[in-house]
Amino acid sequence: MKKYLFELPKFLKGLKQSDTKKNLATRYESLVQPFKKIRQYTDFPFYKPYIARFDTVPYHVPGYCSDSFDWELLFRLANASLANSIDFEWNPEKGLPELLIMVPSANGEGEAVTITKKVSDLFTFQILRLFEIYTEEMMQYEIFTSELDSEEGALTLEKMVQLKKNKALVLKIKKAKVMHDLLG
């Protein structure tokens, strides 16, 4: 198995030791699954029924760390997240899409704004942080559904919407690639 900068067992151990994240780790282990059973992402109970169902496409990543991360997993996690939106813009020089991650936020006056970042413009620490954020988010969903069975239907519906958005985005990217290949 290829070694990447985001090491899941190390991250999970850090959650247990963190003063601010310890509660998440404790709740996850007691309600969902002990961390000792999780060595890689495919060991999470949410991976196969949810994350693995997202289609992936190659996209432009930072050249300095192109072999340092599991970019397919990042694409899947970004698409699976209910906390952000995903889109792309075509990069004609690279012949690849630029993956855009859009996060709702608020400016200094409390007005809603959207922060948009290209994955290819991110620094290593920002990419690592995305893996951490998305992993914590998926763990929170698992805790939430195990605690509140009545809310599981709403969350399942939201997940289905995310899967449909992913299918549409991947189709849009594939069409853009065909146009790029045809028109040069």
Image (cartoon, helix red, strand yellow):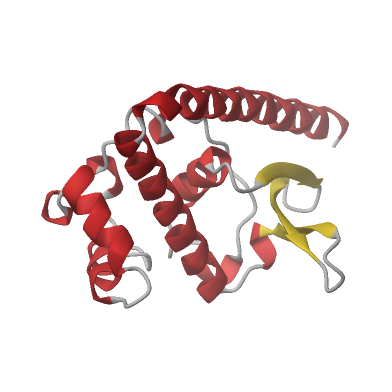
x and y percentages locating residue 141 in the rendered image:
41, 42
Q: How many marks?
A: 0
Q: Residue at x 53, y 35 (%)?
A: 56
Of residues 33 and 11, the one nearer the viewer is 33
Q: Residue at x 65, y 28 (%)?
A: 165
Quick check: 134 left or right of 107?
left
Note whether 130 is above or below 157 in the view shown: below
Of residues 23 and 158, the one nearer the viewer is 23
Q: Quadrant of residue 63?
A: bottom right
Of residues 111 and 113, the one nearer the viewer is 111
Quick check: 79 left or right of 134?
right
Quick check: 164 left or right of 24?
right
Q: Quadrant of residue 169?
A: top right
x and y percentages locating residue 95 in the rendered image:
73, 45
x and y percentages locating residue 50 in the rendered image:
41, 30
Q: Residue at x 44, y 46 (%)?
A: 73
Note whether 47 is above or below 100 in the view shown: above
Quick check: 118 left or right of 163?
right
**Where is the C terminus found, in terms of image quarters?**
top right
> Can you see residue 10?
yes
Q: Residue at x 71, y 58 (%)?
A: 118
Note whether 167 is above or below 73 in the view shown: above
Q: Quadrant of residue 33?
A: top left
